[in-house]
Amino acid sequence: MTKTALVLGAGGFIGGHLVKRLKREGLWVRGVDLKFNEYAETEADDFVIGDLRDQAFVRGVIDQRFDEVYQLAADMGGAGYIFTGEHDADIMHNSATINLNVADASHKRNIRRVFYSSSACMYPEHNQLDPDNPNCAEDSAYPAAPDSEYGWEKLFSERLFLAYNRNHGMECRVARYHNIFGPEGTWDGGKEKAPAAVCRKIAMARSGDAIDIWGDGLQTRSFLYVDECLEGSLRLLRSGFEGPVNIGSEEMVTINQLVRLVADISGKTIEINHIDGPTGVRGRNSDNRLIAEKLGWAPSMTLKAGLEKTYGWIERQVLRNAA
Ligand code: NAD
């Protein structure tokens, strides 16, 4: 029998890529989102537009015993959305409501495998003050002290899905994603993340121009290409390990180094103009020891290889908009 999958948040960046990947594997896929993906036609067999905060709607789309449910829908964005404090109530209310509805409806349909995408934003801020030596080992999560309400909501929902495992015999799997990037993601408008924002700024710049970068650019991060993220997510959902586990890259760079990498790819000479802006924690890097131990796998694609694909796609968007 054909395997079935439900992708919640299928109109988003990772969800859009996930639908394609599941279709390539031959699954029957239903996607659900508030909107269609803006950058690519969906390949889902069925795509339902609606609001997952609405419990009746969620019960309606979880109307069969899917083999795999991927819960990626969340009210989120880049640092400009999450860290200003202006959207805190929405972020917490919207995402928690979605997760409560999905966990409950999946349980009531006797669905076993539910994948939940948490975030590295749930790690305590005090372990991420040293840009050269951040600690994001999975067991460093408690005592909890995330630096954003987005991170607190993720922590709550991790615990929610794992509680359904404990009390209702579900087999939810929880991943903590670290900065996923790639083509067909938000690249302008305020919700874009650092790799997309840097690619856009450089694609729009002329050689010799300076681009604005929030903070001193010495804050560190690692970035994972979307195909690697999907590989890790599918392996986790189909494994016997519930998590939570990091899915991220261990190739840590400063934001200034990220700019240099993209500038090299573009072939342009780019100066940096440091300005005030939200920067998040000082340092963050994935720790892949647990995923390697439990799944015998860890991502290996270089940042440069992923940025080449992403820059090419964003440059085409910029040129198309300018035409
Ligand atoms: P995204 O914003 O592109 O996708 C999320 C989707 O959820 C959007 O298409 C949005 O319309 C949909 N959504 C939001 N509210 C909804 C609602 N009420 N009803 C129906 N749909 C709704 O984000 P993404 O980058 O694809 O991230 C997917 C998941 O991974 C999210 O849960 C996010 O928190 C998590 N995550 C992502 C990253 C990253 O770097 N991209 C890092 C850590 C965690």
Image: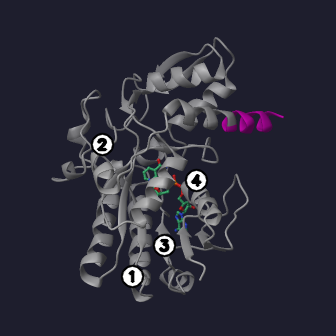
Residue marked by disc 3: 69
- Taking the spot 70% from the left edge, 33% from the top edge, the residue there is 315
For the question of whether residue 279 can be seen, the reply is: yes
The disc labelled 1 sits on which kind of residue? Asp
Q: Earlier in the sequence, mark 1 or mark 4?
A: 4
Quadrant in which residue 220 is drawn: top left
Judging from the image, what secondary structure is the residue with disc 4 in?
A: helix
Magenta segment, prevailing SS (helix, strand or loop): helix
Q: Which residues are magenta?
A: 313-323
| Residues at circles 1 and 2 in contact by the CB criterion of under 8 Å | no
The disc labelled 3 sits on which kind of residue? Val
Q: Earlier in the sequence, mark 4 or mark 2?
A: 4
Ligand 1 is within 8 Å of the C-beta of the residue at disc 3: no
Residue marked by disc 1: 104
- Taking the spot 53% from the left edge, 68% from the top edge, the residue there is 8
Q: CA distance from mark 4 to mark 3?
A: 17 Å
